[in-house]
Amino acid sequence: MKSTFGICILSSTLLLGCTASADKPTPKLQHALLQEPQSELIAQGIARLMRSNNIAVAKDVFMQRSLMVVDNVTKTDELGNPIMGRQLNMPDRFELLIKNDLCFVRHLDSKATEPLPNVKCKVNNK
């Protein structure tokens, strides 16, 4: 009898604890815009995300839109001829996001996300 009563108390406590934490929703990632141009930090974040060398991004990247498209450049030899013929890779798309006061860059196809702790951004209300 005591163990049944204890189990009921424990179950009630756990259920109340779960509903109490559900009252405060988890903040979601929201589309964001940069507060000031920070193309070098964005390029570094994308390089970390894609495990590649830095790419060149426009100085005004993420200033007016939360989305950025990077065309995959065809590899060429020293004479400028395409290697292995024409490449059919789709362009990579990235978006700038914010959660609380932390900015993130996310690769849209893989959903891989990289925090950008030194980047200042704001919610894109457009």
Image: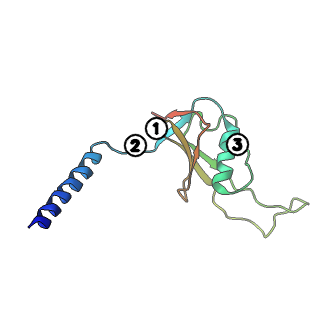
Q: Position of residue 79 (x, y in %)?
A: 91, 60
Amino acid carrying label 1: it is Asn
- Image coordinates of residue 126 in percent, x first then y, are 46, 34
Question: Quick check: 50 left or right of 65?
Answer: right
Q: Quick one: which residue is furthest to the bottom in this view?
A: 84
Q: Which mark identifies residue 27? A: 2
Residue 97's place in the image compared with 49, above or below, is above
Q: Is residue 89 above or below residue 67?
A: below
Q: Which residue is mark 3?
A: 57
The answer to which of 42 and 23 lies nearer the viewer is: 23
Question: Local crowd at mark 1 within 10 Å, few (<14), some, or many (≥20)?
Answer: few
Kind of residue at disc 2: Pro
Q: Which mark is residue 28?
A: none
Determine whether label 2 and label 1 are within 8 Å by CB: yes
Residue located farthest toward the top when viewing the structure as drawn: 36
Q: Compare marks 2 and 3 and give the one earlier in the sequence.
A: 2
Q: Which residue is mark 1?
A: 100
| Mark 3 residue type | Val
